[in-house]
Amino acid sequence: MAESLPEIILYRPEHQPAFRALNHEWITHYFQLEEPDNRMLDDPQGYILDQGGHIFMASYQGQLVGTCALLRETDAVFELAKMAVTPSAQGLGIGRLLGEAAIAKARALGIRQLELLSNRRLSPALALYRKLGFVEAPLPASEYQRADIRMVLDL
């Protein structure tokens, strides 16, 4: 039987437990969950989708193994956030597929710029963001204590 390829699908309400678990897994591996994390992970419908954002899920061999979100900041600027790939599925290009799907959606929506907040400890993630075209930009004050780098992609 042929190996299945990862597939990027749009978030559905029944994906909320996986969305939460995938993000909880990586955040607690490196950091602590913060209040903004809990708000978004517990209620992605209210805090992301109802605000004009989008969530993508990665499916591989029948399992949800990755996710990322586009958070609406303004009509022209969205944030790429909550990107996670479970460790057992890392190295398969799923993060890149998620990032490419989010960028394609942003372009289709006419968004002018994507931004993201991250942490310099996450070097594989930062390398992926650079491959996707993001460049480092000044970091404003953030509600996330772990954020120590901001990157932007002009579309």
Image (cartoon, rainbow, N blue to C red):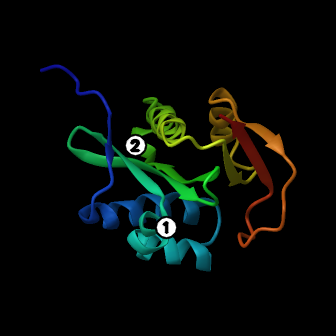
- First in sequence, mark 1 or 2: give its number: 1
Residue beneath disc 1? 51
In the figure, is residue 122 to the left or right of 45?
right
Q: Which residue is drawn at 63% across and 41% down?
A: 125
Residue pointed to by mark 2 = 88
Where's residue 19, x and y in %? 39, 61
Q: Is residue 112 above or below residue 52?
A: above
Which image quarter: residue 144? bottom right
| Residue 92, percent from left and from top | 42, 30
Residue 11, image x, y percentages:
33, 54
Q: Residue at x 32, y 67 (%)?
A: 17
Residue at 74% across, 50% down: 121
**Residue 152's spot in the image, x, y percent?**
73, 43
Residues 103 and 15: in front is 103
Cα gap from disc 1 to disc 2, whole angstroms = 32 Å
Q: Which of labels 1 and 2 is toward the front?
A: 1
143 on left or right of 106? right
Return the residue found at the far right: 138
Give the structural element (helix, strand or loop) at label 1: helix
Look at label 1 and name its amino acid.
Gln
Question: What is the secondary structure assignment of the residue under circle 2?
Answer: helix
The mark found on residue 151 in the picture is none
Tell me the amino acid under the disc marked 2.
Ser
Between residue 73 and residue 140, name the one nearer to us: 73
